[in-house]
Image (cartoon, helix red, strand yellow):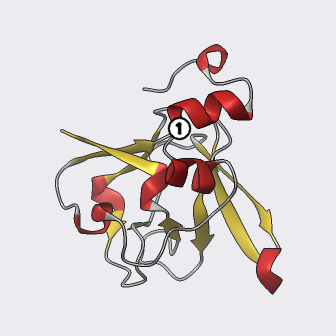
Amino acid sequence: MSESESELPDNDAEWREILSDEEYRILRESGTEPRFSSDLIDVKDEGVFTCAGCGTELFDSDEKFDSETGWPSFWDVYQEGNVETRPDNSHGMQRTEVVCAECGGHLGHVFDDGPEPTGKRYCINGAALDFESE
């Protein structure tokens, strides 16, 4: 369950108070964690992956797969409208950025090389996620 928008921080100083340094760097500054550094890569339990910034439900464990890329990967989102995508032409590449629709936090990128039925690979920074086991 996500928090209402009125409960979200109003400025960077407030975000820095509630997020760890790594979470802030990734969610608010569009950073990337090192490959294979997230404990969430190996999570196989049933549950939901939520935004570390606001708690919005983003991905279900049933849609998680091992992409062997070094980041948690999903072939679909938990609920349509909980994530948004936007063009990302940084670092001399053309990619599609994935952000939390509630707080605007950077999550990672989506690619068209995932498994069926969607063919999508949501490649997500583990530090941008929390896991709620069922």
Residue 5 at what x, y percent from top left?
A: 65, 20
Amino acid type, callout 1: Gly
Quadrant of image for the C terminus: top left
**Residue at the top extreme, as displayed:** 6
As rendered, which of 118 and 38 lies closer to the eye? Answer: 38
75 over 18 or under it: above or below: below
Residue 69 at what x, y percent from top left?
A: 43, 83
Residue 97 at what x, y percent from top left?
A: 69, 63
27 over 35 or under it: above or below: above
Q: Is residue 94 left or right of residue 78?
A: right
> Splitting the image into 4 quarters, where does residue 132 fall?
top left
Question: Which residue is the site of mark 1?
Answer: 53
Q: Is residue 134 left or right of residue 89?
A: left
Residue at (82, 85) in percent of width and height: 92
As rendered, which of 133 and 78 lies closer to the eye? Answer: 133
Q: Is residue 49 left or right of residue 79?
A: left
